[in-house]
Image (cartoon, rainbow, N blue to C red):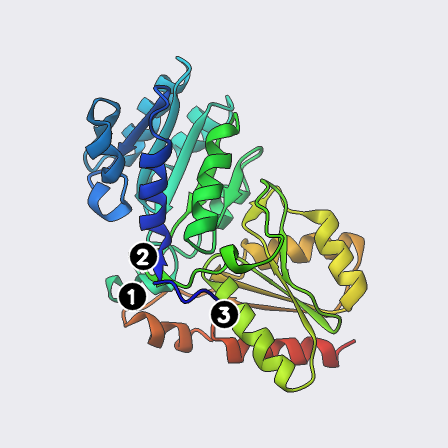
Amino acid sequence: MSELKKIATRLAYGEALREFGADPRIIAMDADLGVSTMSAIFGQAYPERYIDMGIAEANMAGVAAGLATTGKIVLIHSFAMFAPGRMYDQVRNSIVFPRLNVKVVGSHAGVTVGQDGPTHQALEDIALMRALPGMVVLSPCDANETRLALRAMLDYEGPCYMRTGRLAVDQITQDIPGYRFELGKGCTLRDGKDVTIVATGYMVAQALKAADALEQEGVSARVIDIHTIKPLDQELLIAAARETGAIVTAEEHNIIGGLGGAVAELLVENHPVPMERIGVRDTFGRSGDPASLVEYYKLTPADIAQAAKKAISRK
C-alpha cells in the first residue's frame, strides 16, 4: 500500500466533485451536513449550483427528481444513515422508478464512523439500494477509486448510490499495476490460487493485509476489489470460484443484503463453492473508537485470514 498519507473517501469525494464541477449541468444538494459530507467543497467553488435543503432529506430527493427532469445531473448528500434511510420512499418512487439522473451519496457509512454510535452507523444502506431495480451501487475503497467512481457515476445516465467513509484510509489502487476502473467490473488486486477474498470499501485494505498474512502461512489468496456492488461483476466472480475453489467476502456492512449476500446469490446459482462472509452479523453498531469497533465486529485482517482458512478446509 502507498506510503502517501491516508485520506477519507468522503474528503476525496468532495475534492473530486469540485474538480468535475465545472459542468453546468451538475447541481449538488445537501441536508445541512455539507461540511461533514464534504459536498460543501463544491458549494464553495460553485455556490450558484449548490443548495442546502436543511434537515429535510425526503424533500431534497423530491426536488432533485424535479431538477433531473430538466436535464440536470443532480447529486444529493447526507449521512448514509439518512440518505438513503430517511428518503427511501422518494428515492424509490420519484427517482429510481422513472430512472432519473440523480446520484445519492451517503457518507459516514459503517462502524468506522466510531463514537457517533449505532444511530449514525449505516449498516443497511447497500441492502436498501441494491434491492431497487436499476439502481447502481458503488462502494470505493480509497481516494483514487472514489475519484474514478464519481467520474463514472457522472458519465452514467441514471440513478446511482455511492457510500463514502469518515475514517482516513490507506491509498491502495494507484500502486496496483494494471489497475483500471470500470463501472460494473471488479478488479483483481492480487492473484492467488487457494482462495479468493472479495472485498469492498474499507475492507479492501484489510483483505490485502490478510492476504499478506496468509502468504506467510503458505496460503495463496487472490484479492478482488468489488467497487460496484450492483451491477455485480458476475464473470470475474464465477471465474474466481472455479479457479480457487473457495470464497471469502469482506464488507463493513451487515452480511444480510450486502456484498456477501450478492456474491452468495450469484454463486449458488452458477458455481457453488465453500464460502465465508466477513461483516457485521445482523446487529446494530455501537459507540467506540474505529479501531476497537473493527476488532469487536471481527473485521480485522486476522478475522479474514481465519475465514479464508476455514473456507479452504471445506473444499
The disc placed on residue 68 is none
Whichever of labels 3 and 1 marks the residue nearer the N terminus, that label is 1
Query: Residue at the spot x=24%, y=27% of the render?
Result: 46
Tell me the SS state at disc 3. Answer: helix
Seen from the viewer's position, the closer of residues 191 and 27 is 191
Q: Is residue 307 left or right of residue 166?
A: right
Residue 227: percent from left, percent from top: 54, 50
Residue 1: percent from left, percent from top: 48, 67
Query: Residue at the spot x=37%, y=23% of the render?
Result: 23
Seen from the viewer's position, the closer of residues 148 and 126 is 148
Vertically, is 304 above or below 54?
Answer: below
Amino acid type, mark 1: Gly
- Identify the residue under disc 1: 114
- Identify the residue under disc 3: 206
Cα–Cα gap, marks 2 and 1:
9 Å
The disc placed on residue 166 is 2
